[in-house]
Amino acid sequence: MGSPQPKRLVFALAWQGGSEPVAERFGELTAWLSEKTGFSITPRMALSYVELERMVRSGQAHIAWLPPLIFLRLEREGQIVHLVKSERAGHASFHAAMIVRTDSPIRSLEMLRGSRAAWVDRWSASGYVIPRAILIAKGLTPKDLFREERFYGSHEAVVGAVLSGRANLGGTYAQLTEKGTLLRGAWSNVRGGESNVRVLMTVGSIPGDLLAAHVALNEEERQVLTQALLAVPKDALMGKIMRRIFGAESFRDGPLTGYDVLRGAIDDGPK
C-alpha cells in the first residue's frame, strides 16, 4: 500500500497591474512552503482583488494574501481565519498618503478642485477608501471635486501616473516613524519618486495586509502553515522573495489589533 498523498492546497494572491510580475518567484515560495509543511501547495494569481475574494469565498483558494478590507469582509462572513500579519519597516501598520508632484501648485485639499485623481483599487484602504473618506469628512465630495478619477492597479502605477502628469493627485501608502516623521512610501520604489513626489497629507494608522486560511482547514493545519510562514524571513533566499512578492520584511502572528478603523468601511465598499 502506497504512502498517503499530501494534502493539496491553493495559495492565491492578486497581481497588481503595473507592478512587477511575480509568478515565478511565487512558485519558488510555494515550493519551499510545500517542503516545510508536507502539503502540496499550488500558487495561483488573481487578476484583481475582486477575483481573489471570489476565489476564497468559493473555496478555490485555501491560503490567501489579503488587503485588510477584504480580509475583514471575509472574516465577518466566517470564511477565513488570519495566520500572520505583514510588517514593513518594523511596523504592522501604515498610513494613507495623498501625493502630488513636487512642482505642483496644489498645497491643500481645497485646491484639488478640477484635478485628476489616481487610485489603486476600489478595495485598497490607503489607495482609495481612506483618502476618499477624508475628503468627504471635510465636505469635499470626490465626484464634484475631481474632473477625472482612474484606477491604476498598483501603488507604483499610481506614483507613475502622478510623476508623468497623467494625474494631479495620487492615493497610496506611507510609513511614518513613531514620532510622525515620514520614512518612506510607494514612491520610494519608483525611479525619481523620492525627489519628485510631495506628500500633501497622511492619515492613519491603517493595519497591514494579512495571510489568511480558509475555514475548511483545521486548527492543526493552520498552525503548520503559520509556523512555516514565520520561518520564511529567516531563510536568506525566501526572505528576499517574500520582500519582492509582498513588499513585507517579516511576518507576525498573534491577535489582531487596530482594525476597528476599517470595519465601518466594509459596507461602503464595492459589491
Image (spheres, grey):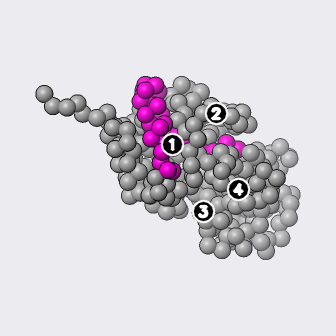
Image coords of residue 41 (percent x, y): 35, 42
Identify the mark nearer the N-term, 2 or 1: 1
Q: Residue at x 39, y 44 (%)?
A: 33
Amino acid type of the residue tagged 1 in the rendering: Leu
Residue under numbered circle 4:
174
Identity of the residue furthest to the left in this view: 1
Q: Residue 240's spot in the image, x, y percent? A: 49, 58
Q: CA distance from mark 3 to mark 4?
A: 12 Å
The residues colored magenta run 206-234
Of badges 2 and 3, nearer the viewer stands 2
Q: CA distance from mark 2 to mark 4?
A: 21 Å
Residue position for label 1: 230
Label pair 2/1, CB-CB below 8 angstroms: no
Q: Foreground residue, 140 or 49?
A: 49
Which circle marks residue 156 in the picture? 3
Disc marking residue 76? none
